[in-house]
Image (cartoon, grey):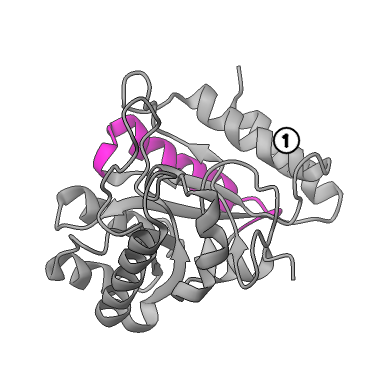
Amino acid sequence: MTTWHDLTEELDHWSDAGRIATLWWRDDDAARPDPALDRLLGLCTSLGSIPLALAVIPKTVHQEAAGAILAQDTATVIQHGYAHQNHAVEGERKAELADNRDGHDALDELVIGRRRLEAMFDDCFAPILAPPWNRLAEPLLAQLAGAGLSGLSTYGPRTHANPAEGLAQVNCHIDIIDWRGSRGFVGEDRALGLALDHLQGRRSAAVDATEPTGLMSHHLAHDEASWQFIEEFIAATSRHGAARWLSAGDAFERGSGT
């Protein structure tokens, strides 16, 4: 059983080594005005202006939602695909940017989506792609920079800081939703275990030590236990001297490998 004490102990190890455990927070599926979005944005403020990378769906984002996001000065908008539409063939895992799609069509949509987000969010937008379902057809990697996207975020420890020319990758590692079971909170033991797995892996160089540890949330799927964990996790790490929360921009700059 992984506990909050285990998390503190791990951060103590970072402190003893004179190192800082960098973290970042990405929330997916923002598009429409919703009480859950309001709660998410309010949580950033109540937790001491914690930076948030908000993955926004370009095709369906509402102007009212954009206004709420722009009013939260610690939020950075990144691109959540184009329409969050599944294009995978039957029997394969869901993906918008699937292997079977025509690459030109997929890239054209990404460019349209990027331009829409740039127009709506201006300096609040960072050209980072968080593919829906965290999946991206391998041939598209080399094309993202040409589509105006300089960053990529999926899930799990990265294998390359720069998987293609002009592209930096910083992933998430702590998924708090039990997608294959209850579709609610995955549980404290599991969520903390994911955090420790990545932090310990970084400290021991079993995974890329320069990749910030990413918390991934989905505000529309949260139950009360999900919200409570986010609050407690951010509070516990924020009060420890060996942990530092980064904005999306800082996460990609510090973890770019360049």
Decide which of 33, 232 is in the foreground and name it.
33
- Can residue 247 be seen here? The reply is no
Q: Is residue 145 above or below residue 14?
A: below
At x 40%, y 69%, the residue is 76
> Image quadrant for the C terminus?
bottom right
Residue sitting at x 78%, y 47%: 14
Say if residue 17 shows up in the picture: yes
The magenta stretch spans residue 121: no
| Left or right placement of residue 69 versus residue 206 in this view | left
Q: Is residue 134 left or right of residue 150?
A: left
Tell me which residue sits at (31%, 77%) in the image: 115
In x, y percent, where is residue 182?
32, 20
Q: Amino acid at mark 1?
A: Glu
| x then y, percent, for residue 70 | 27, 74
Depth check, front residue: 192 or 119: 119
Mark 1 residue element: helix
Q: Residue at x 35, y 72 (%)?
A: 111
Quarter of the image for residue 253 reads: bottom right
Taking depth in this image into account, of 180 and 245 the one nearest to the observer is: 180
Q: Measuring from the top left, give residue 90's x and y in whole percent.
A: 31, 28
Quarter of the image that includes the N terminus: top right
Q: Which residue is mark 1?
A: 9
Total marks in image: 1
**Magenta-drawn segment:** 220-244
The quarter of the displayed image where residue 212 is located: bottom right
Q: Who is closer to the viewer here, 4 or 108?
A: 108
Q: Is residue 217 above or below residue 9?
A: below
Residue 91 vertical placement versus 150 (above, below): above
